Image (tube, rainbow, N blue to C red):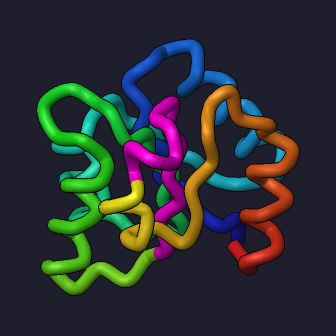
Amino acid sequence: MAKRILIAEDDVGSREIIVMHATNHGYDVVAVTDGIELLTAAANERFDLIITDLMMMDLNGASATEIMKMQGNTVPVVAITALSPDDIHLVKNKFVTVFHKPCDYKDLFSYVELIGC
């Protein structure tokens, strides 16, 4: 059975690229456009990993991740962001790792496989 990844990314082009790479690596993928959809999907379905953009409309990835953890969700979360390392220093500990845009998707999915997802 394929492992499942939830991808939350508001930029259509970035979301499509991440979905394509995840699918090419054999993952079953669900993609959403914001943090509210991320919370809904995570509450209603089982995932092995979540990949989220940090800056999204309505609810950002860091806040969505914090809410999930408060609800007891233990799925590992990887963040992707265009923010600088200095801008994310207060939230980076919420994630198993953070990739900065432009992201090398080969590196991203090598990391995903390394952590066993």
In this rendering, would 114 be left or right of 89? right
Q: Is residue 95 left or right of residue 22?
A: left
Q: Position of residue 70 (x, y in %)?
A: 15, 79
- Is the residue 87 above or below the residue 93 in the image? above
Residue 46 image point, x, y percent: 41, 70
- Residue at screen point 74% across, 79% down: 116
Q: Quarter of the image containing the C terminus?
A: bottom right
Which quarter of the picture shows residue 45? bottom left
Kindly indicate the quadrant of the structure image that contains residue 39: bottom left
Q: Magenta stretch containing residue 39, yes or no?
A: no
Q: What residue sits 50% from the left and 52% below the top?
A: 79
Classify 96 as above or below 51: below
- Residue at (85, 59) in percent of width and height: 110
How far across and how far down the image is residue 33, in percent? 33, 29
Taking the view exactly as shown, the residue that stands out farthest to the front is 86
Q: How many badges with numbers are in the image?
A: 0
Q: Toward the viewer: 29 or 73?
A: 73
The percent position of residue 114, horizontal first and vertical second, equals: 82, 74
Q: Quadrant of the N terminus?
A: bottom right
Relative to 106, say whether 62 is above or below: below
Residue at 65%, 67% in the rendered image: 3
Image: magenta residue range: 76-88
Depth order, front residue of 17/107: 107
Q: Is residue 74 left or right of residue 71?
A: right
